[in-house]
């Protein structure tokens, strides 16, 4: 695969987002709402309802993430944005819980919460260019800190739980561990 073309998810690209996530809505019908909605609320919804929550978020803006393309085909996704736009990511006790020097209500503190790739493109290194584009995107929109809670180990590169990204990819991009609430899931940070 050539270097992917990466674009912010804006309303005009909703059809591409739906194509990438497919009829089931990516990971178990999540539609990337795991950090937008309380678990009880999210589990009570149908896949169509979760999709509408995410599409409404796209329509309201700002872009909640980036799409990667192989030619004209959407093949990858990374959710990235201000911490306060993903409220469930900020809960106390989570591996991604904010630290006192980077509070969730600070618009300069951003997070990368998840990735999703078309099955045919998993395990092919697409996380690297998406992460690089995410760093540039966050920086250009005024972020001062960019955080993530990736996974240190996974049984395989194509594992769905790896949707948070591999820690080694973040390390390679310059992120450093700032906290570890759960072994194997560090909170990592890059100062922009």
Image (tube, helix red, strand yellow):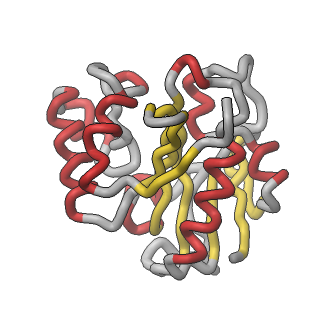
Q: Percent from the top left, x then y, of residue 25? A: 32, 27
**Place of residue 165 in the rendered image (x, y in percent of width and height, measured from the top left):** 65, 40
Q: Is residue 68 above or below residue 108?
A: above
What residue is rendered at 33% in x and 38% in y?
Answer: 16
Q: x, y (%) of residue 164?
A: 59, 40
Using the image, determine if residue 78 lies above or below residue 25: below
Instruction: State the count of labels.
Output: 0
Image coordinates of residue 70 in percent, x first then y, are 54, 34
Question: Does any portion of residue 124 appear in the rendered image?
Answer: yes
Q: Which residue is at 21% across, 58% downward? A: 59
Question: Above or below — where is 169 with respect to 99?
Answer: above
Q: Residue at x 62, y 24 (%)?
A: 122
Quadrant showing the C terminus: bottom right
The answer to whether residue 183 is left or right of residue 65 is: right
Compare residues 117 and 171 and report the one nearer the observer: 117
Q: Residue at x 56, y 55 (%)?
A: 112
Query: Image check: 122 left or right of 86?
Result: right
Left or right side of 191 for 24: left
């Amino acid at each position: 695969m050539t270097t992917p073309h990466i674009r912010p998810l804006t309303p005009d690209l909703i059809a591409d987002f739906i194509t990438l996530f497919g009829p089931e809505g990516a990971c178990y019908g999540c539609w990337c709402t795991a950090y937008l909605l309380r678990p009880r609320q999210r589990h009570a919804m149908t896949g169509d309802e979760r999709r509408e929550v995410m599409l409404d978020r796209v329509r309201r803006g700002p872009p909640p993430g980036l799409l990667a393309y192989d030619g004209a085909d959407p093949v990858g996704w990374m959710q990235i944005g201000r911490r306060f736009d993903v409220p469930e990511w900020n809960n106390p006790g989570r591996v991604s819980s904010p630290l006192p020097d980077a509070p969730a209500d600070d618009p300069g503190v951003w997070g990368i919460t998840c990735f999703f790739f078309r099955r045919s493109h998993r395990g092919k290194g697409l996380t690297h260019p998406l992460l690089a584009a995410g760093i540039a995107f966050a920086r250009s929109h005024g972020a001062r800190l960019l955080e993530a809670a990736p996974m240190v180990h996974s049984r395989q590169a194509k594992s769905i739980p790896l949707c948070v990204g591999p820690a080694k990819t973040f390390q390679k991009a310059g992120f450093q561990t700032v906290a570890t609430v759960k072994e194997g899931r560090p909170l990592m940070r890059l100062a922009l």
